[in-house]
Amino acid sequence: MEADFSQFTALDLRVGTILEAKFFDKAIKPAYQLKINFGEAGILQSSAQLTLRYTVEDLIGMQIIAVINFPVKRIAGFRSDCLVLGATDEHGDVVLLRPEQPVPDGWKIA
């Protein structure tokens, strides 16, 4: 399926720093609950299936890229405000997309 440029520009992709991470024991698949600072866009939460590659300690302080304008999703009672982006294989192993250098939280991806 092809997407046109207007669909891409409708996405609000931003850089954020993970402030908190904890194991999400109510999730069906192993996941973490994340609290992420997106600067002027605010602090948002996300549920992310990152447990194969990352520990809580790995995640805290890490800058990531996320879509911050999807509708809120409830996952096992947890409010997920954004979608953290990563490359994944068929086994669910995820490598997070991150800026090459530190940048201010909230920078837009263009």
Image (cartoon, rainbow, N blue to C red):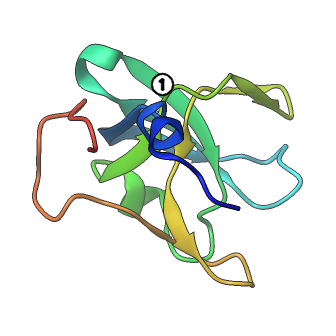
Viewer-proximal residue among 5 and 72: 5
Quarter of the image for the N terminus: give it: bottom right
Q: Nearer the viewer, residue 24 or 15?
A: 15
Neighbor class of circle 1 (other Cα within 10 Å; few <14, some 14-19, many 20+) is some
Figure check: 9 above or below 60: above
The residue positioned 71% from the left and 46% from the top of the image is 24
Quarter of the figure with residue 42? top left
Q: Is residue 70 left or right of residue 57?
A: right
Q: Is residue 104 above or below residue 48?
A: above
Residue sitting at x 33%, y 29%: 37
Q: Please give left or right for residue 50 compared with residue 95 in the image.
A: right
| Residue located 49% across and 69% down the image | 54
Residue underneath mark 1: 44
Secondary structure beneath label 1: strand
| Name of the residue lying farthest toward the bottom | 90
Question: Which x, y percent locates residue 44?
Answer: 48, 24
Figure check: 11 above or below 98: above
Number of numbered callouts drawn: 1
Q: Nearer the viewer, residue 35 or 105?
A: 105
The picture quadrant where one finds residue 38 is top left
As shown in the figure, which amino acid type bears the numbered disc 1?
Leu
| Quadrant (top left/top right/bottom left/bottom right) for the C terminus | top left
At a point 59% along the width and 52% down the height, the residue shown is: 3
Position in image of residue 94 (x %, y %): 56, 72
Q: Name the spot of residue 57 as percent of width and height, x first.
A: 40, 59
Q: Residue 16 placed where, x, y %?
A: 31, 38
Compared to residue 96, the image places residue 67 above or below, namely: above
